[in-house]
Amino acid sequence: QVQLVESGGGLVQVGGSLRLSCAASGATSSVSGMAWFRQTPGKEREFVVRISRTFGSTYYADSVKDRFTISMDNAKNTVYLQMNSLKSEDTAVYSCAADRYGGGNYYSTVTYAYWGQGTQVTVSS
């Protein structure tokens, strides 16, 4: 089992920045990649970004490309999401996810076996 704990959400104005963190613990050696998804009320979880542990390969949703940056500290088993130039449409609950032994569609929630509790990000105009 892998446990994920997010932190760093909050309220920010349009154009501002926030940094989210996701700390993994437990059987982290089984994790091939970690991702961030977000969800707003009444909508399905939306893929935001993924990073692979071994080579650091990244995959971004078009909606956040050039504004968000994912990074990983393998020594700390922690993933960071730096969010810049935030827009009101970025408001959502952001959840960290980890896969188990890799494979699958990186953009799909079913690929990820472990999830954090989520952290609220609110961007106000």
Image (spheres, rainbow, N blue to C red):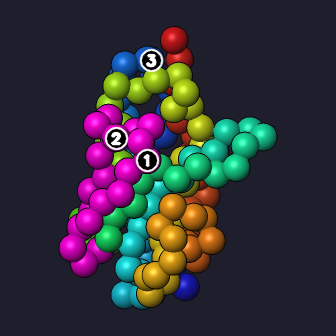
Q: Residue at horizontal 43%, vertical 82%?
A: 102
In the rendered image, residue 72, in percent from the top left (x then y), is placed at 27, 62
Task: Tell which circle, 3 or 2, labels the residue nearer the N-terminal end.
Answer: 3
- Closer-to-camera residue (105/49): 105
Type of residue at label 1?
Answer: Ala
In the rendered image, residue 109, in percent from the top left (x then y), is placed at 60, 65
Type of residue at label 2?
Answer: Lys
Mark 2: which secondary structure?
Answer: loop
Q: CA distance from mark 3 to mark 2?
A: 19 Å
In the rendered image, residue 114, in percent from the top left (x then y), is placed at 56, 73
Q: Residue at horizontal 51%, vertical 71%?
A: 105
Residue that label 1 marks: 61
Q: Are marks 3 and 2 in contact (CB under 8 Å)?
A: no
Q: CA distance from mark 1 to mark 3?
A: 22 Å
Mark 3: which secondary structure?
Answer: strand
Badge 2 crowding class, 10 Å Cα cut-off, few under 14, some 14 to 19, many 20 or more, is few
Which label lies toward us, 3 or 2?
Answer: 2
Q: Are marks 2 and 1 in contact (CB under 8 Å)?
A: yes
Residue that label 3 marks: 13
Q: Residue at horizontal 52%, vertical 53%?
A: 47
Q: Which residues are magenta?
A: 53-72
- Tell me if residue 18 comes above or below residue 101 in the rendering: above
Type of residue at label 3?
Answer: Gln
Q: Which mark is residue 65?
A: 2
